[in-house]
Image (spheres, grey):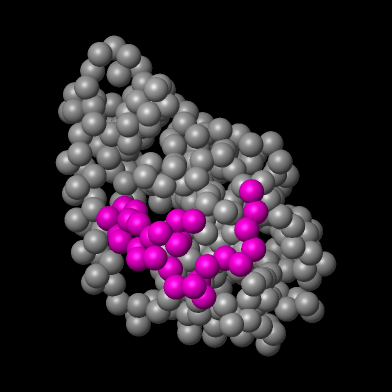
Amino acid sequence: MNRLPLLLLAAATAVSAQERDFSKVEIKTVKVAGSVTMLQGAGGNIAICAGDDGVAMIDDEFAPLAPKIHAAIAALSPKPVRFLINTHWHGDHTGGNAQFADTATILAHANIRKRLITGGSAAGNKFPPAAPAALPVVTFEEGVSVWWNGEEIQAIHLPPGHTDGDTIIWFKKSNVVHMGDDFVTYGFPFIDLNSGGSVTGLVAALDLALGQIPADAKIIPGHGDLSTVADVRKFRSTLDEIIGTVKKGLVAGKSVEQLQKDKVLAAWEPAMGKGFVKADLFIATIADDLKRNSK
């Protein structure tokens, strides 16, 4: 596969991470439904379930933002965070784990704990091994339910898509689903092949999720604004079309470089090319994924 787009992405995102000024980040609070509120700052979206029992939290962005996130939660409830569930291991979703571990029990899929222990890199950002306090103390394989504030908060592990630890969180009473980075609204998704992710696997994961989620559920994407199940279905269908286009070109004997030169994803670029994953990188990722899955 063509490594140049990957190298360019790595260089660009590494510089971006170094230059980020978290002091300028504001935490936006968005009421979703029932007991669930979404917090948006820098990094992945956070879901907060607040009620008589206290606070349950999904993801926690970056460590430097923890004081601001604590303040936003305090405005919703005077009670501490008792449960924290991670949707996957990337630092823009787990970076604040240790800052909430003094009161919260951290839960995650077993693969998330394993990858936090070893550390690694994703999209050019290097994540060192997590401190012991940041590690999940309860792990699961298929899923787990937390009964809290009158909700069944169900964590469901999906087949490898964004990573191999991907977990969606369904607040059943409030009818809200946090999709983690299996669904994002910034454009072409980032698929972390080195963390067990798969583009074709993401389509299968979305099919599994959509088979369980109520049609009228409100959707919290991993990144982006509040969405609907229809948005997730459109995202899934678009991915299927894009994968089919790249696969067709490869079967016809074209190289990754030729597909990039031919701009085979041009039709989707106006809607999908606005994020940090550009068309050339996504073509290379799909081709690499298809090659791996053909072995």
- The residue lying toward the viewer, choosing from 277 and 286, is 286
Residue visible at 61% across and 85% down in the picture: 74
- Do we see residue 221 in this rendering? no
Q: Is residue 118 magenta?
A: yes
- The residue lying toward the viewer, choosing from 150 and 160, is 160
Q: Is residue 251 magenta?
A: no
Quadrant location of residue 82? Answer: bottom right
The number of numbered badges drawn on the structure is 0
Q: Which residue sits furthest top?
A: 252
Residue visible at 32% across and 46% down in the picture: 277
Q: Which residue sits furthest bottom?
A: 78
Q: Position of residue 67 (x, y in %)?
A: 48, 84
Look at the picture and state if 121 lies above or below 80: above
Q: Position of residue 128 (x, y in %)?
A: 35, 66
Q: Position of residue 272 (x, y in %)?
A: 37, 42
Residue visible at 23% across and 27% down in the picture: 256
Look at the picture and state if 148 lies above or below 202: below
* Quadrant (top left/top right/bottom left/bottom right) for the N terminus: top left
Q: Which residues fall within the magenta stretch?
A: 114-141
* Quadrant (top left/top right/bottom left/bottom right) for the C terminus: top left
Q: Position of residue 156 (x, y in %)?
A: 66, 49
- Do we see residue 247 in this rendering? yes
Residue visible at 27% across and 40% down in the picture: 281
